[in-house]
Image: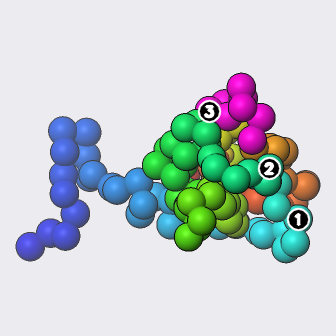
Amino acid sequence: MSMVDVGPAGPVVKVEERLFQNRYLVDAGRPHIRIKPHEAPSKALLALTHLCPAGCYSRNDKGQVEAVVDGCVECGTCRVVTAKTGEVEWNYPRGGFGVLFKFG
Ligand code: SF4
């Protein structure tokens, strides 16, 4: 019995399985994305706990949003979603650091 689902276009691979194929070189102590200090997150910032494809955003016990961007795929979603609120400071990682895509 096969463990892989097959769709009309071929094998169906979950996003999580694809992301697992990537490799990351973490720039320790120099995250390329930072959240500005806040008491309560805006709706935009809060939405990132659901929107980030790499699951980098979460809420702490005070209800604030935190980010651990070690697995960031540099899609820019958080940058766009918080463009108006300015709560996220977004930069590309330094050269040689960040995500190494295995499949494009
Ligand atoms: S750039 Fe994309 S993957 Fe990286 S933290 Fe923002 S939403 Fe997540």
The structure residue drawn at horizontal position 33% and vertical position 55%, both measured from the top left corner, is 13
Q: Is mark 3 within 8 Å of ligand 1?
A: yes
Question: Of tags 2 and 1, which is closer to the observer?
Answer: 2
Q: Do residues under tags 1 and 3 come within 8 Å of each other at their CB atoms?
A: no
Could you tell me how far apart the alpha carbons at marks 1 and 3 are, in whole angstroms? Answer: 22 Å
Q: Residues within 10 Å of mark 3 (few under 14, many from 20)?
A: some
The x and y percentages for residue 65 are: 62, 56
Q: Do residues under tags 2 and 1 come within 8 Å of each other at their CB atoms?
A: no
Q: Secondary structure at mark 1?
A: loop
Q: Can you identify the residue that label 1 sits on?
A: 30
> Looking at the picture, does residue 31 appear above or below residue 74?
below
Could you tell me how far apart the alpha carbons at marks 2 and 1 are, in whole angstroms? Answer: 15 Å
Which circle's residue, 1 or 3, is located before the other in the chain? 1
The x and y percentages for residue 101 are: 63, 55
Q: What type of secondary structure mainly makes up the magenta span?
A: loop
Question: Of tags 1 and 3, which is closer to the observer?
Answer: 3
Q: Secondary structure at mark 2?
A: loop
Q: Residues within 10 Å of mark 1 (few under 14, many from 20)?
A: few
Q: Amino acid at mark 2?
A: Lys
Magenta residues (range): 80-87
